[in-house]
Image: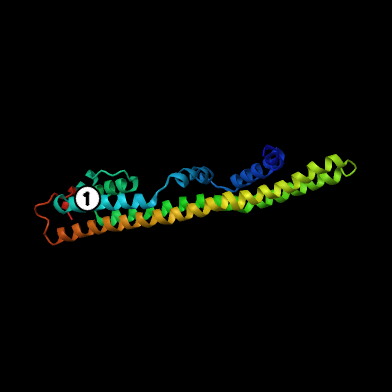
Amino acid sequence: MIDVVDRFFDPLAFSVVLGGTMVVTWISATGKDGGRGFGALIPFFRARPARDAERADEAVQRIRHLSEYKGTLCADRVKTPVDFVHRAACRLADADSAEKFAVWAREELEDRRARHKAAIGLWRYAAEVAPAMGMIGTVIGLIMMFATMNDASAMGPAMAIAMLTTLYGLILAFGIAGPVAARLERLSEAECAWQARVAERLLALARAEEKALAEGAWRERPVHPLRRSA
């Protein structure tokens, strides 16, 4: 078994493909995209969008019930382990109008989608580069083979490098980088979907409160100081 593994592993071929792919991918990244791409491996393994969506819905329900009696000013009193919902609740409590909360929510979601897109794009680019690195390794192996044609014992290792680099490039592209990019995209879509739903529901609460204030139906409930003058 060990002999079989040894036949399919060559340090030089592995270094050419993996190292070349990482360097070229990193060079192509801008700003913090490189760090975000590799940092995305944490949610790749740990993210549970369905669980987070369920917890977010429960938190929004508690915020809604609380706001019916004490207003959205107290939205930040609801405790939740979901970071986005917590920040949205704090923003809702501090916002002096529904429109300002809507602006924050829109910018927050757009920024999150942009970060996700950058991380996904990095892995997609790595999937495109890896086969090319494999071909470069193949060319290097062929050159080594042709340079040692007068030595039959040296031709075998050179041919092995030529073949293994192609194999490594395909595995890296279609077995690792490509699937990582695809999963990150699905996680991003699921996460952005429930976060947009949370933002819409909280915005609806803010607008309902503004409407009630305008109609004078909020007499017994605390009003945000900045809203009192509205």
- Residue furthest toward the left? 220
Q: Position of residue 70 (x, y in %)?
A: 15, 49
Q: The C terminus appears in which quarter of the rendering? A: bottom left
Q: Are there few (<14), some (14-19), or many (20+) residues within 10 Å of tag 1?
A: some
Give the image location of residue 91, x and y in percent.
28, 48
Residue situated in front as seen by the camera: 219 or 88: 88
Residue 35 versus residue 191 in the image, above or below? above
Looking at the image, residue 150 sits to the left or right of residue 80; the answer is right
Looking at the image, which residue is at 39% across and 55% down? 192
Across the whole image, how many numbered discs are drawn on residues?
A: 1
Q: Where does the N terminus fall, quadrant-wise? A: top right
Q: Quadrant of residue 147?
A: top right
Can you say whether 155 is above or below 192 in the image?
Answer: above
Q: Position of residue 121 (x, y in %)?
A: 54, 53
Q: Label 1 belongs to which residue?
A: 62
Give percent across and percent down for residue 124: 56, 53
105 and 64: which is toward the camera: 64
Q: Is residue 6 left or right of residue 100?
A: right
Tell me: 46 left or right of 16. left
Colour convention = rainbow
Residue at the spot 79% in from the left edge and 43% down from the top edge:
158
Q: Secondary structure at mark 1?
A: helix
Badge 1 amino acid? Arg
Which residue of the protein is positioned furthest toward the front in this rendering?
Answer: 1
Residue at x 71%, y 46% (from the top left corner) = 164
